[in-house]
Image (tube, rainbow, N blue to C red):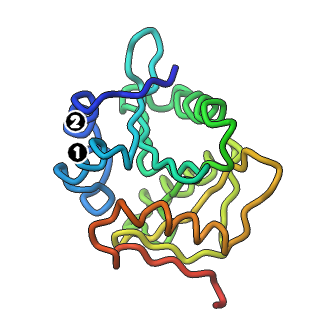
Amino acid sequence: MIKRVNLENAKKIYKEYMESDFSDDELPKYEHFVELIEDEKEIPYVYMEEDVIKAYIVCIEKNGYILISHLAVLKKYRGQGIGTKLLEEIKEFYKKEKAIILESEAEDSADEKRDLQTIIRRQKFYERCGFIPYNNLDYELTKVKYLIFVYNLQESTLTNQELKNVIIESYKDILKNKNGLIIKIKGE
């Protein structure tokens, strides 16, 4: 079950999980994170089974598009199908919206062979869950290269240009450093 969390629980999730699940360049500073939650520019949720938090997700909800800014299964529950259940619930939860967008580190951002295997495994997981990779976008957020995946909730499919515009619009009130987002359509 997906449940929206309040500010106090979002702060706990940040301190207890997000700080260790994400690198410094993938995570907003704590004060900025709190501000984003307070202003409802990012919406935090947890995935629970039998009243136990097993995963969390932070979303940017803008103009009918849902951009997942952070998603993680708690370490002790990884490899148990929790991520699949979470994404299925998210699709159902947002079924009246246009699309769900998520970011996965690009292969060329890997430091070591193990990192590369993790990145490839994560990308294949998103594809198995029905998300379509948009390989024609060069996308960098806070100096980390990402591959964008989209799950269309309506009949239409986003063009590269539409997706680029949605991402820019989604992050315009989120990023403190406006130069932190670089997105180009390959060949432009």
Residue type at mark 2 is Lys
Q: Is residue 117 above or below residue 179?
A: above
| Rendering quarter of residue 28 | bottom left
Give the camera-side residue of 10 and 35.
35
Please, what secondary structure does the residue beneath circle 1 have?
Answer: helix
- What's the residue at 23%, 49% (across, down)? 35
**Residue located beneath label 1 in the image:** 34
- What's the residue at 49%, 69% (across, down)? 168
Q: Residues within 10 Å of mark 2 (few under 14, many from 20)?
A: some
Residue 139: percent from left, percent from top: 51, 73
- Camera-side mark, 2 or 1: 1
Residue 38: percent from left, percent from top: 27, 42
| Rendering quarter of residue 179 | bottom left
Q: Is residue 174 above or below residue 56?
A: below
Residues tagged 2 and 1 counted as in contact (Cβ below 8 A): yes
Residue extending furthest bottom? 188
Q: Is residue 128 above or below residue 89?
A: below
- What's the residue at 44%, 43% (across, down)? 71
- What's the residue at 40%, 69% (across, down)? 141
Residue 130: percent from left, percent from top: 71, 45
Please, what secondary structure does the residue beneath circle 2 have?
Answer: helix
Give the camera-side residue of 54 and 41.
41
The label on residue 100 is none
The quarter of the picture where the C terminus appears is: bottom right
Residue type at mark 1 is Val
Residue extending furthest top? 50
The label on residue 11 is 2
Q: Residues within 10 Å of mark 1 (few under 14, many from 20)?
A: some
Give the camera-side residue of 124 and 16.
16
Residue 24: percent from left, percent from top: 24, 58
